[in-house]
Image (spheres, grey):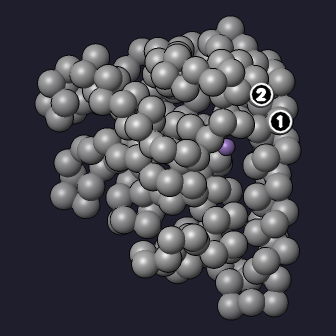
Amino acid sequence: MAFTLPDLPYAHDALAAGGMSKETLEYHHDKHHKAYVDKLNELIAGTEWEGKSLEDIVTGTYNKTAVAQNGIFNNASQHWNHSQFWEMMGAGKNTIPGNLEKALTEAFGSVDEFKKKFSEAGVGQFGSGWAWLVKNADGSLAITKTENGVNPLCFGQTALLGCDVWEHSYYIDFRNARPKYLENFLNNLVNWENVASRY
Ligand code: MN3
C-alpha cells in the first residue's frame, strides 16, 4: 500500500491570521510534502521497505555514520516530519494546557525561557533542518535541532513539537528572517492542545 499525502487538518488559509499564508501552505504542503511522498513511493517500490510502516522505514534506514542520508530515509523522514508539523499547528490553539505548562516550567525555568531556547535551536541549525521539543525515554524534556530530515524517532525520543526551519517553510512570509518566523510560530501558530496530547 503506497503512502499518500495527508490532507491538512484545516483549510489552506486557516493559519494566515497567525502568520502562515495560504501561499506558503499551498507550496509547502501541496508541492514540497507531496514530492517527498511521491519520491518515497518510487524509491521503496520492490524493496524490503515496501509495505513497512513509515516509522519502521525511518528508524530502519537512519544511518548514524553517514554524512549524507540515503534517499529512502530522507523522503520517509520528511514525510513523517511534515505529517506531524501540520498537526502541531492550528488557529486559536495558543493556550498551553496546564500540565504541559507545568512540565515546561520545571524543565526550562519558564515558558518564556523554553521559547527562547527553542528559537535558539532553530536559528542555530545551520542550513536546512528542524527544531524540536522532545520527551526522552526517561520522561525528561529536551530541546534539540536536527539537520535535513533527521528527527526524534532516530534517537528513540517522542516528538512533542517540531518546527521546520527549511527556507521553504518561511521564505514567502518572512523572507530571510528565520528568528521572526520562529518567534511567530511559537506565539501564534502552535496547536498546544496537540503538543500536550503527545506529552
Ligand atoms: Mn518543509
Q: Nearer the viewer, residue 41 or 10?
A: 41
Q: Relative to 154, is 20 above or below?
A: above
Q: Is residue 88 left or right of residue 133?
A: right
Q: Which amino acid lies under the numbered mark 1 shown in the image of this protein?
A: Tyr
Q: Are discs 2 and 1 less than 8 Å apart at CB?
A: yes
Residue 10: which quarter of the image? top right
Residue 21: which quarter of the image? top right
Q: Nearer the viewer, residue 11 or 69?
A: 69
| Mark 2 secondary-structure assignment | helix
Disc 2 designates what residue? 24
Residue shown at 36% from the left, 30% from the top: 120
Q: Is residue 72 left or right of residue 186?
A: right
Residue shown at 63% from the left, 24% from the top: 176
- Image quadrant in which the N terminus is located: bottom right
| Mark 1 secondary-structure assignment | helix
Residue shown at 24% from the left, 30% from the top: 104
Q: Position of residue 134 (x, y in %)?
A: 35, 47
